[in-house]
Amino acid sequence: MNEFEVFLFDSEWDFEFCWTSKKTYGTINPRKSLVKINIRLMLIETLYHEYYHTKYPSFDESAIERMAQTKVQSLSVSEIIRITDKFVAYWGKGGE
């Protein structure tokens, strides 16, 4: 394992997947050896990003990134949670 993999899989650090805020993908608390990953924010931004690629195929990457980030910032936390929960439940069953 390389140093990064040791950090991820074989260290004193714990990881928690939870909502933090609309401003960060993660936080670290060195006193508790805890890394919190904002998986919902990453997921919703990625989903909108890819959706905008399908809707606006001629737009460049920076335009798509701006559009996705702007959209995500306009959503309420409850909307983000609702959409990501629905997406994971649907695709977690194979999309049926």
Image (tube, grey):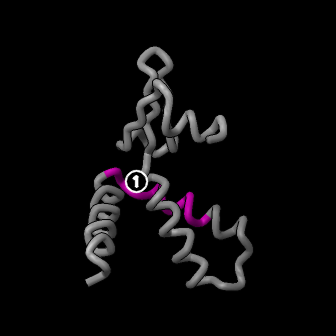
Residue 61, x across and y down, in percent: 71, 69
Residue 50, x across and y down, in percent: 55, 74
At label 1, counting other C-alpha atoms closer than 10 Å, the crowd grade (few under 14, some 14-19, many 20 or more) is: many
Question: Which residue lies under the disc numbered 1?
Answer: 40
- Compared to residue 11, the image places residue 80 above or below, namely below
Q: Does the magenta stretch mainly form a helix, a strand or a loop?
A: helix
Residue nearest the observer in this picture, 36 or 49: 36
Residue lying at 43% horizontally and 51% vertically, measured from the top left: 39
Q: Is residue 62 left or right of residue 86?
A: right
Mark 1 residue type: Arg
Residue lying at 35% horizontally and 53% vertically, measured from the top left: 76
Span shown in magenta = 67-77
* Quarter of the figure that contains the C terminus: bottom left
**Residue 92 sits in which quadrant?**
bottom left
Based on the picture, tell me whether residue 75 belongs to the magenta stretch: yes
- Compared to residue 45, the image places residue 55 above or below, namely below
